[in-house]
Amino acid sequence: MDRRLDRRSFVAGTAATAAAVALPATAQEAFPSRPVTIVNAFPPGGINDIATRPLATLMEPILKQPVVVETKAGAAGQVGAQVVSAAKPDGYTILSHNNGISSYAEVDKLFGRPVKTSRSDFIPLARIVADPVLFLVNDQQPYKTFKEFLEAVKAKPDSLVFSSGGLYGATHLPLAYLEKVTGPIKVRHLPTNGGGPAITAALGNNAQLNAQSTSATLQHIKAGKLRPLASYGATRSKVLPDVPTFKELGFDVEYYLWVGIFAPKATPAPIVATLSSAIEKAANSDVFKTALTNAGQELAYLNGPDFQKFWDADGKKTDEAVVYIGKQ
């Protein structure tokens, strides 16, 4: 046997094997190569569901892959947040969440528990909406103004029930923000597992009042089932111009129910860039803006870095609200 030929065959074979091994790694660099899942941390009917589904549809032709919205609701959005924080940081599992994502660490600290989920577990990709919250009563209540409601609840403490999407969640926090400027509002609290169920509780009179986004409640307001007494927005809503702001009523408070898209920490920068670009193009499209308008929302897009700055400041306010609420 020619040893030189045998050695050349060995070297050639080794090179071919190395090349074969290298090919899949090269192929893996193309992202995405399969469907992307957006975990929606809240049930249908709330602001996250309303904003995320049309966004996902519009991302599909940009990414050239299906974008699936999968609901993982529970514990005021913490179930979905934990699913994504524990997911492989490869861009194929991302999160749709709201203000409530900021509260989890502070709540765990409040109760002396190990922190399960914190803001540092996520990379913010984009904020897509920031909906001014409305303070609402159902149609079985006599109150036509916030002043009438406030006088009634002070005269009869704990006579009414306030429903929210969960303890310390995005639709529980507005009450704490409000109480900081009005003084204590003595109502009983009914936490549910999302904005949709909280609205259902008010519609069925299991609760008499709640604080919810315009988009999630507009159809019920138009039907006369819910009555907004005031808006947490800086200015009056374009779709509800007759509803005064709290600032107009003399209460210096603002609160917006925002929706953001997040990736798990350690997601590679090129994948973050691809997802962020797809979200930006989809969110700023006329089709998406029209979908938001039809739902009573307006685009409030922030890119990842700007969203991070906003989130840092908003998170501090959330921490303060959790401390104010205390143990419940």
Image (spheres, rainbow, N blue to C red):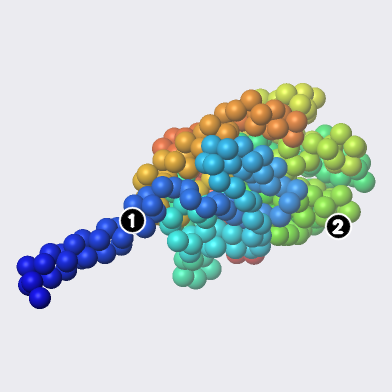
Q: Earlier in the sequence, mark 1 or mark 2?
A: 1
- The answer to which quarter of the image holds residue 76 is bottom right
Residue 23 got which mark?
A: 1
Quadrant (top left, top right, bottom left, bottom right) of the N terminus: bottom left
Residue 31 lies, with reference to residue 307, above or below; the image says: below
* Numbered disc in front, either 1 or 2: 1
Q: Secondary structure at mark 1?
A: helix
Question: Badge 2 is on which residue?
Answer: 206
Q: Residue 45 placed where, x, y %?
A: 75, 48
Q: Amino acid at mark 2?
A: Asn
Q: Residue 189 placed where, x, y %?
A: 74, 58
- 182 relative to 18 in the view: left or right: right
Residue in front for this viewpoint, 11 or 162: 11
Q: Is residue 141 visible?
A: yes
Q: Residue 221 placed where, x, y %?
A: 84, 37
Residue 147 got which mark?
A: none
Quadrant (top left, top right, bottom left, bottom right) of the C terminus: bottom right
Q: Residue 308 placed where, x, y %?
A: 44, 41
Q: Amino acid at mark 1?
A: Leu
Neighbour class for label 2 at 10 Å: few (<14), some, many (≥20)?
some
- The answer to which quarter of the image holds residue 25 is bottom left
Q: Residue at image x 17%, y 66%? A: 9
- The answer to which quarter of the image holds residue 287 is top right
